[in-house]
Every structure is written in structure tokens, then in C-alpha cells.
Amino acid sequence: MEIFKKTPNIDFLKFRWFALALTIAIILAGILNMTIGHGLKMGVDFGEGTLVRVMYKEPISVSAIRQLLDDVGLGDSIIQESGKSGREFQIRTVETRTTSQTGEEIEGHQILANKVISALQSKEDQQRLAQGMIDLNNIDSRSLTALLTEISAENSEELASRIMTYRNEHGIIVNWDELKKEPVSLPDEILNKLQARAFLGQMTVLSKETVGPQAGKELRKKATQAVIWSIIAMLVYIAFRFKGIEFGAAAIFTLSQDVLICLSIYSFTNREINLPIIAAFLTIVGYSVNDTIVIFDRIRELRKTMRKEPLEKIMNLSLNINLTRTIITAGTVFLAILALFLFGGKVINDFAFIMLVGSIEGVYSTIFMSCPVVLWWNQLFGKKKKVRK
Amino acid sequence: MKKNVKWKIGLTLAVIALSIFLIYPPKEKIKLGLDLKGGTHLLMQVITDDAINVETDQQIARFEEVFKKNNVTFTRAAKEKPGQFYFEGISADQEGKIRDLIDEYTRDWDYTLTGDRVNFKLKQPAEQYLREQAVLQTLETIRNRVDQFGVAEPIIQRQGSDRIVVELPGIDDPERVKNLIKVTAVLEFKLVKAGPAPDEETLLQEFGGQVPDDAEIVKGDPRRGLQGYYLVSKVASITGKDLRSVRRGVDEWNNPAVSFTLTPDGARRFEQVTGQNIGKQLAIILDERLQSAPVINSRISDSGIIQGRFTPEEADDLVVILKAGALPAGIKYLEERTIGPSLGTDSIRQGLLSGLVAIFAVMVFMIFYYRLSGLNAVAALILNTFLIFGALSYFKATLTLPGIAGIILSIGMAVDANILIFERIKEEMALGKNAGSAINTGFSRAFTAIFDSNLTTIISGVFLFQFGTGPIKGYAVTLICGLVANLFTAVFVSRLIFDLTVPTNAKKLSI
């Protein structure tokens, strides 16, 4: 099967100034948005703060949650619905309001996290907790085992693990009947005793993450350092293999503009920058370098046989010969990421989104950006050499 | 030629067998990170200044003793800051003697004599050593505590100079573990001289408002229902180091308590102290908080109990920390993540599903577009996936979300390698070559591009691994494994499959 019956003959380099203008426009828009617009959202990994994920028994609206948080003075937290059931949310508190004498800001964040959690619990649940009842939807396995041991001495450990497994699979236990049925099959007698001591809370905490300011700062520094060193290493290797600093520089330029364009587009969404997103950016960079090298490899090869031809013509030919490959590769990657985007779940969704953007953008940058940079570099720095000779 | 193919088949089969051996059974061999499995991640900093402080205090006490014994006069000894102290009011004619004494007793401290003062400063290498030791001991103690607590497969690692990462899979009650890790756990038994009193003034009334030289004030632990202040002897009769064994027990009212036995040396001292002080109270102090102060009824030698209105969990935890020993320095939490097991279950299920869908979609496309040669690529792709997981299992690496990103990149590049080769073969065939020689040139021409792009990415992966922390490292590991596997499967194995299935003189190729 073929996409093109014959090798196409498109003058891609003709569009180089137009492409440069487009790139600059997108990046400028992104920078404006990131600085004076609504800005880039730093996730809990890089900024400091607390991220709490919760799940409710019944669907509830974001505004209802905001109201609950507003009552305890945390109304400006970032609330996002995750999942499709309308029952799962993630709440991100931004600043520390608790002053800490110990210098341990993380303690402040933790107090904040606990405040968020207690604000989200219903009044009835709070009363029950105050009465010493136990919330079966938030209990840990050890305490559940202890509780079951108190009410019935027999096989409490096994019962506890059955209940916990059930809760882990469903996120939250909605009503007692669920525990009577398979696979938990709790005997009526024990269920009655359990109901006297425990209740099924309205909400369960799925995860709680707290990052102190020091850790966030360090992570930012380390991640930046790692990325800069790896870019320098790539530059050196490419310059060495392709016998010219201009190829290394072009590869780095191309991948930088990939990152900037994706970052700009990302800044217009409501998504946050966190560690998996950094991994996604590194992956986009990886594909970009891969694509660029494939083209450069063809240029390197053609230059041996077409010595007399101008570089520009060789570049256009290389791009055209490789066009099928560029499209198919990007297409398969797009296909794979699309699966992650559609079925990967909430944790992976931001990651898959930016990868989708990156896989399309990568084609654009390979075709329209990588080669022109080599030409521009030669125009800027190449001529001087000749003059000196 | 035949011989050549034989060893290639052998090698390929051996690699397949090895990776299956490494992966099987996957539930045990492939370790999932906390973001996929659920559990608690704690990042903490060891406050190594504590260790320097302790050393400074000990050094002051030591030289006070040395100077007194050798009749060196001084008016005051004081600590300036951790690792720096001075003696004041020394006389000039004793300078030589002081120099000799210091030289004799320490090599770790620099000193200068100015006027009536001698200033001590901890030497850099000694300070470095103390800080290093503090981190190593803390690491060891935390490891002991977590082991005693009974967590399956905990990860306890040092990170950088003074950071420690603790990862506890499956723990859904982080507060308890956090407290368990953080307590310094210095246990001391001291004689009670006075108390309890509601405040310090009342306590010191019978001593004329001054704390006697051989005594100090401790507060009762509110968690044990003790609010008041106590005056206790400065020197501990026995400490946590004298404990031989600790276990959960009950007191005379059947409340949870901790019973202990002492080492022979500790028992001897304990017998002496209890024998001489019958009728007095003995304070049991944990981390400078009085837990209980029972009256000594009789001479006790090698065993006893610690009581103090414990809940069963608190008694259990106390057993754990006493067994594991005290921390040499305090710790401070920098980061805490608890991923509930249900979120983890969700992530695995969806991650697995989407991963399978992704790989399946790519495979269908390759077969659709490249026909039989597409099957070749699919075989290489499957083998590649096996190799990545085999390598992960071999390196005992954990699979995290960023790690999955690394796998996606490497699988994408594996498919790309096949596409590059196939497109090149098509080009050669379009030039009129027969299948055999087109495959030959296709592979050799495409090789430079595949090699350079994979190696560039591997190089950047190595740097990410070297300089990155946890999650970035996880990404780099899967990426490097994947790309190395890629060079093997896409270039070597794929070629082998062509060699085996396509006769050298074949005219046509299903591609």
C-alpha cells in the first residue's frame, strides 16, 4: 500500500518564513497568556500545596463543593471534576494560611488538607464521628480488622480484607446491602453489629498529596538541570555525527520550539503541569529529535551522491522522500496516544492530551522548521568563514 | 550462510526465553510504583545539625571535666552555635597547659586562644563525618522501625546528601506511620525529686526558685493524661540502650502496657537504683515527655513495665520504636503523598486497557499497511515489549506513570524503525531491485538513521537518569531499556525473520 504513488515534489522550504512567523505567533500568544493571561498552572509537584482527591456516594456539583469550602474560608481552592460520574473531584489548595512557628510549612499544608476533608463531609457524618462512630468509607484495614475483632472474634481478618477489596474496587460503599451480597457476603448478624458501631460516610478520600515549598523548589531545579544537561549532550552528539554544529543547533532549535509551542497550547487549557507532564514533554522532545535525525540522515546520504546540487534542493528532496515515513510514524504514534487519551483514565489524561498535541506538532516542526534552521545558521555564520578564506 | 542463521536463531530464542523467565509470574516480578498501586510516599530531611549539637554539648562537658581535673581555671563555658564553643576566664599563664590538654584529648576540633578565651571550632572533615553518620544511622533506624511495623516491600532510600525517601505500598493510614518514623525515641528512667506541680514556680518553691544542679524539669505527656511539671535527676539511671527485649504486655489493671527486660549491665544498675530508692517515684521519660512515674515498691533487677494509659495501638507502636532504637537526629517531612488503593486499582486497570488498545491499534495498522512484512514488525514489537519488562524486572525497577511514558516513546521509536526500513526497501524495489537485495540495502541504509536517533535519545536518557530524581529517573530507565531492546528487535530480529521467510532470489515482497 502507498500513500503517494510517486515520490511527491513539494517545495517545503519555500514556506520557511511563513512557518517561522506562525511559530513565533503561537509562542508569543502562549507567552502572553502565561505571563499576563491566566498563566500556567503548576501542579502540586512543583508548586507547594495540597492535592486531595475525593469520591462521593451521590453526584454533586462543583459549585456545591465550592460552597462547602467557602464556609471554612477555602473558597478559592481549585476544584476539578475527574471521571465522568460526577462523583469524583480533585481539590487543590494553593497557599499556606497557617503560620507555622516550627518552620515546617508542610505541617501547615497538612492542616489545610485535613480542613478540606472535614469541610467536605456532611453534617450527619461529622455528628456520627463526634459520637465515636466509625466511617467505613474512610477506615484503614488495620483498624477495620480491630473493629471486627471486637464485634466477632472469628475470621475478622478475612472479613476485613473482603470489605477492603470491595471498597478498593468500587471506590466507595454506597449502601449496606452491597456488603450482604457477593463477593463480601457479610452475615446478617455481623452486619447488624457493624451498623451499631459504624456508618457509611458520604465521601471517601482517594488520595492526599502534600508538597512542602522546599521539595517543590528542589524538584524544579533538579528537573531543569536534568533537561539542560541532556540537551547539551544531544547537541554534542548530533554535531559530531553530522559533522557540523549547524545540524546540532537545528535539532536543538526544533525541539525547543516543540516544547514552547506545546507549552503555549497547554497554557490555554485548564490542565496543570506536574511530573507526568514533564515526562510527556521529554517524550515529545524524543520524537522530535528522532524525526529530525531521520531527515538529516537522508541529507547526509544524498550530499555524497549529489555534490553539485545546492543544499536547499537536497533538503527538499530528503523531506519529500521521507514524507510517507513521517506521516505514517506520526500516525501510528497518534493512534497509540489516542487510545491512552480515550481509555487511560483521569490520571493519564493530561499526559495523553499533550502527547496528542505533540505528535501533530512534531510533523509540522520536522517538515517546516528543522531544515530551514540549518540554512539560516549557514547564512548567519557560514559566510564569514568564506570571507576569511 | 546457514551456520550464520543458526546462531542468530539461537540467540533470539535465548533472549526470548530469558525475558520470559525474568517476567514470569508478572504479578511478583513487575513492581508497580505508588502512583499505580497506592500507598504512602514520604520525603524527609535529616536535621544533621542535631548531631553537631549533641557533639558540641558532649565536647563542652568533656573539657569541663578535663580542665577541672587538671586544675585549669575558667569562669564559663558556652556554646556559640552548633560546632562552636568557648571557655572564658582562663588565665594567661596556663596557656601552655591548656594547649597540651586540648592536643591530648581531641583532634577533631580546631582551637584558638585570644585573651582570656579559648575558642573551639569543629574541623570540616569531622563535621562532614558526623553529618554523614547521622544520615546513615537515621536511615538504619527508620528501616528497623518500618520493618518492625510490618510493611510489605517498603522502599527506604537515601536521596542526595541529607534526604530520605520512604515508600510504603498499601499503607492507608499514613499518620500512624509518620509519627512512628518521626519520634526520636530517647527513653530514659530518672528519679523524681519533686512534682507533679501545675507550673514551674510551684515546683521549684522548696528549692528556692532555682533548678538544682543535678536536676532538670520535664513535662508530663498530655497524651498519657499527665499535665503537670516534674523535677527529675539530671543523670538517667538507665536508658533505651540498656533494653534487651521489649514486648506488649498489660499492667495490673489489664491496660495495655509495654514490658521490657534489661541487659546484664543495665540490670545491675537498675537493681542498685531501685534498691536504694524504695518508696520514691521513678520517672519514665520518652523524648523529654514523662510517660508515667510509678512508685518503686521493691528492688527490681532485670525486668519491668512501662505503663501510662496507652491505647493498644500506642503500646504496639512504642514496642516498635523501642526495639528499633533512637534516632541520632531529628527529621522534618518535606513531602507526603498518599494514594488510596482504589485510585491505584483504577489507574492499573485503565492503564493496562489503554496500553493494550494502543499496541493492538498499532499492530492492526502495520499489518494493514505493510501486509506480511507488517507481521514481521508486529513480531518485533511484541518481542520488544517482552524485553522492556524483562529488563525492568532484572534491574528491579518500579513501573510508574512517567515510566509508561518512557515505554510509549520507545515503542513508538520501535515502530518507526520498522517503518524506516520498510519504506527504504520499497524505495529500493521501485528502483528495480529484487526482494533479496532490496531488503539488504534497505536494512543497511536505514540503519544509520535508526542508530543515530536511538543513540541520541539513549544519551539524553542517561543524562536524565544521572541528574533527575525519582519519577524522571523512572522515565529514563524504561526509555533506555526500550531503546536498547529496539536496536536488537528492529534491526537484528526483524532482519532474521526476513532472511528466514524470503528466499534470496525472490522477486516480489508483501510490503
Image (cartoon, helix red, strand yellow):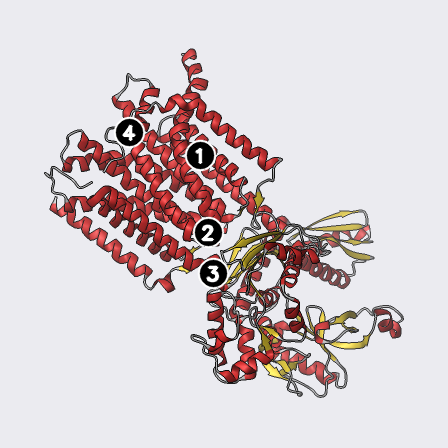
Q: Residues within 10 Å of mark 4 (few under 14, many from 20)?
A: many
**Upstream in the sequence, badge 4 or badge 1?**
1
Q: Is residue B208 left or right of residue A39?
A: right
Q: Residue at x 49, y 44 (%)?
A: A278
Q: Disc 4 and disc 1: Cα gap in Å?
A: 22 Å
Q: Nearer the viewer, mark 4 or mark 1?
A: 4
Q: SS for tag 1?
A: helix
Residue B480 shows in this picture? no
In three-dimensional space, the C-alpha distance between marks 4 and 3, rounded to whole angstroms, equals 46 Å
Circle 2: residue type: Ile
Residue B181 coordinates in the image, percent (x, y): 59, 65
| Quadrant of the drawing holding the C terminus of chain B | top left
* Mark 4 on the same chain as mark 1: yes
Dot 4: what SS?
helix
Q: Are marks 3 and 1 in contact (CB under 8 Å)?
A: no
The label nearer to you, 3 versus 1, is 3
Quarter that holds the N terminus of chain B: top left
Question: Which residue is denoted by mark 1 in the rendering?
Answer: A255
The image position of residue B64, as x and y in percent, is: 75, 61
Question: In the rendered image, which residue does mark 4 sit on?
Answer: A321
Label 2 secondary element: helix
Q: Quadrant of residue B315?
A: bottom right
In this picture, residue A309 sits left or right of residue A192: left
Number of numbered markers: 4
